[in-house]
Image (spheres, rainbow, N blue to C red):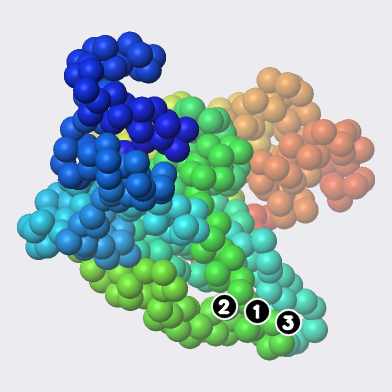
Amino acid sequence: MPTPRVLMSKIRQALQLLAGDAGLSLRQVAAALGVSKTTISEIALYARDAGVDWPLASTLSDDELQARLYPPPRPRSTTRAEPDYAALHQELKRPGVTLQLLWEEYRAGVGQQAYRYSAYCEKYRAWAKRLKRSMRQVHPGGERLFVDYAGQTVPVVDAATGEIRRAQVFVAVLGASNYTYACATWQQKAADWVGAIIDTLAFIGGVPRLLVPDQPRALIANPDAYEPATARLMQELAEHYAVAVLPARPGRPQDKAKVEVGVQVVERWILARLRNRRFFSLAELNRAIAQLLADLNQRPFKKLPGCRAQAFAALDAPALKPLPATAMVLAQFKPARVNIDYHVAFEGHYYSVPHQHVGAAVELRITASTLEVLLRRQRVAAHARSAKAGGFTTVAEHMPVSHRAQAQWTPTKLISWGERIGAATAGVVRWQMAHRAHPEQGYRSCLGLMRLAREYGNERLEAACARAQSIRAPHYRSVKSILACGLDRQGSSLLGGDVGTTAPMPAHDNVRGPGYYGHH
């Protein structure tokens, strides 16, 4: 390295003393000039190599002397081969690929022109910093699917009424390729979220290892930065598709930067292009989104090679897990308890459960066509849904053996109880037995009549049953309402005769007749 100009005077003095007749040693010259012996030794070495003695040095200017003693270093004859940083960035997204591996491949290709590993890493990181935050994140192929809803909504007009409804726009982005999916839903409820995610998995044709949503209440039962608990429908999705749910931490946008940028891209390249169009159905809007989505995934990247579709085919698609044989069917969940007649109720219809579970707290899983009964997450009964209010769906195997074989003694016992109260009560009990596919299904109403007898007394129950028959409403609810309103005490004139006189039973094809139970 050249000696600073301020020392040039000492260099001249050193050369003069070393060449003088006195024949001073290096140590003596160093002591005379107040510098180290090493410095004097270096000056003598440089002068000898440059062929400069004191007589010559005395004729040179300071710049000329410095140029002779300390010439500038020669430039290296070889140049370094610059890596393809964009291709390197994409390669890092492949499972198992590291910077060390890529550097070794780079060095094998360019030989002596390769950067050292440390310089290679520094140059790549400096290049990556110039990318957008979302693009410089490196996620292995097939690892993460980020999902969110856009802030913008799209108006949809009801063609019949002219009413405008705002559709929500769902966005999903794969971490490695930025491959994007979008669709419109009416709301952001659990069924909307899960339904859109199911459509996304069908669109990409596979299942990632991690699903990264935000923490909306529709999906996360207990939002938390460290241990968020997913809601019931989201749990079912995770189990059905064998995917782990890793919600982004609240207030940490870096956890979901991919989808945040994906939302911006969808708003700019899809929703902005649809701003002047009018839509009259959600299906029409989704068809328009799908057309523009195909174009979006084919648009070339600005700073990376290829486009989203090409990156998806190379990075994410090969690493996705296969879809299950059937898509998940959306369901709602409702708590229930198995009644004494081994049935559960939903929307006024009754569905049977194996009789040994009477009294158990269960969970109903309801889809558009089925109702399942779950006990500690295990299915114990499944039925086709029925819209018949007051009806029963009963599986024979769910009934006790005694009921399946010959259980007429139970209705007979109930009728005998009614006869001890009075003719009207017995008539109402017989009506319950006669209007059920299985007589045992009348238990619920008859047990209710027994409770009314304990609450209001036998005499009032008999009067209420007589009134219920007179108005052709021999139902438990009617009898209960009559007692609650005190209508059983309003006298026989309102009934058109004596309280104990029963009106004819209503005609019906299912009525078995008065002699039916006498023979059983």
> Which residue does the image show at 43% across and 27% down from the upper left?
360
Q: CA distance from mark 1 to mark 3?
A: 18 Å
**Front residue of this view, candidates 131 and 230:** 131
Side of 326 where 64 appears, left or right: right
Q: Which residue is mark 1?
A: 272
Labelled pair 1, 3 in contact (Cβ < 8 Å): no
Q: Which residue is mark 2?
A: 269
At mark 1, the secondary structure is helix
Side of 35 where 132 appears, left or right: right
Give the amino acid type for the residue marked by disc 2 in the picture. Trp
Mark in the foreground, 3 or 2: 2
Query: Residue 328 placed where, x, y %?
Result: 36, 58
Give the amino acid type for the residue marked by disc 3 in the picture. Val
Q: Earlier in the sequence, mark 3 or mark 2?
A: 3
Q: Is residue 408 above or below residue 322?
A: above
Query: Which quarter of the picture shows residue 317?
Result: bottom left
Side of 400 where 489 appears, left or right: right
